[in-house]
């Protein structure tokens, strides 16, 4: 898998967060719009490709911020970009808020329960990957997520 350049990763994360940025070439509305606008009972098939794209972006951020390889870079030399932090914060906020909307529904169906579990699992992947970037010691986010999913009993759905 080729790692994205940092500018493209930032632009795509902003698109996923529905944050407009000047001169952007990415036009898709991404993750936040999907979880805000799509009927939650129909969201499951849409989430995995969005998660995989977000993880591609986070891999690029990890390399950019934490060096190559991240585990060999001293903590003091790491910096964080505000646009990326805002985009990931918005993605996390929108995703967790949408997962919480399931709890507020007065009519619960098995399809909604399945959708909620899937969305919570997607959000777990994004949250753990983001925390790993901030921690700075993981060279491969997907490998770390696969291992962590095994430890905590979650299904890994982050692609290759």
Image: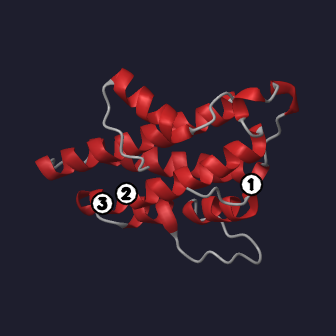
Residue 49, horizontal then vertical, whole percent: 41, 60
Q: Quadrant of residue 134?
A: top right
- Residue on which disc 2 sits: 47
Residue 157, horizontal then vertical, whole percent: 36, 45
Can you tell which of label 3 and label 2 is closer to the viewer? 2
Q: Nearer the viewer, residue 86 or 28?
A: 28
Q: Image point 36% across, 39% down: which residue? A: 156
User: Disc 1 on helix, strand or loop?
Assistant: helix
Q: Is residue 100 above or below residue 1?
A: above
Q: Image point 50% across, 43% down: which residue? A: 126
Image coloring type? secondary structure
Q: Is residue 70 left or right of residue 36?
A: right
- First in sequence: mark 3 vs mark 1: 3
Label of residue 43 in the image: 3
User: Disc 2 on helix, strand or loop?
Assistant: helix
- Residue on which disc 1 sits: 83
Q: Image point 49% across, 51% down: which residue? A: 94
Q: Quadrant of residue 133?
A: top right
Contact flag, marks 3 and 2 (Cβ < 8 Å) = yes
Compute the Cα span from label 3 to label 2.
6 Å
Q: Is residue 7 left or right of residue 129?
A: right
Q: Is residue 5 above or below residue 75?
A: below
User: Disc 3 on helix, strand or loop?
Assistant: loop
Tell me if residue 154 can be seen: yes
Q: Is residue 146 above or below residue 13?
A: above
- Mark 1, Cα crowd under 10 Å, few <14 / some 14-19 / many 20+, is some
Residue 23, horizontal then vertical, whole percent: 76, 78
Contact flag, marks 3 and 1 (Cβ < 8 Å) = no
- Mark 2, Cα crowd under 10 Å, few <14 / some 14-19 / many 20+, is many
């Amino acid at each position: 898998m080729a790692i994205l350049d940092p500018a493209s990763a930032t632009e795509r994360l902003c698109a996923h967060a529905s944050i407009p940025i000047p001169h952007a070439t990415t036009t898709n509305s991404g993750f936040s719009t999907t979880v805000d606008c799509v009927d939650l009972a129909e969201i499951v098939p849409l989430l995995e490709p969005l998660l995989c794209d977000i993880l591609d972006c986070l891999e690029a951020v990890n390399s950019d911020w934490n060096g190559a390889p991240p585990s060999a870079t001293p903590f003091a030399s790491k910096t964080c970009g505000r646009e990326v932090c805002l985009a990931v914060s918005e993605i996390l906020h929108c995703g967790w808020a949408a997962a919480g909307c399931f709890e507020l529904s007065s009519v619960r169906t098995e399809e909604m329960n399945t959708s909620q579990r899937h969305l919570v699992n997607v959000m777990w992947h994004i949250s753990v990957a983001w925390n790993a970037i901030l921690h700075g010691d993981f060279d491969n986010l997907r490998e770390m997520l696969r291992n962590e999913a095994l430890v905590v009993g979650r299904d890994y759905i982050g692609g290759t």
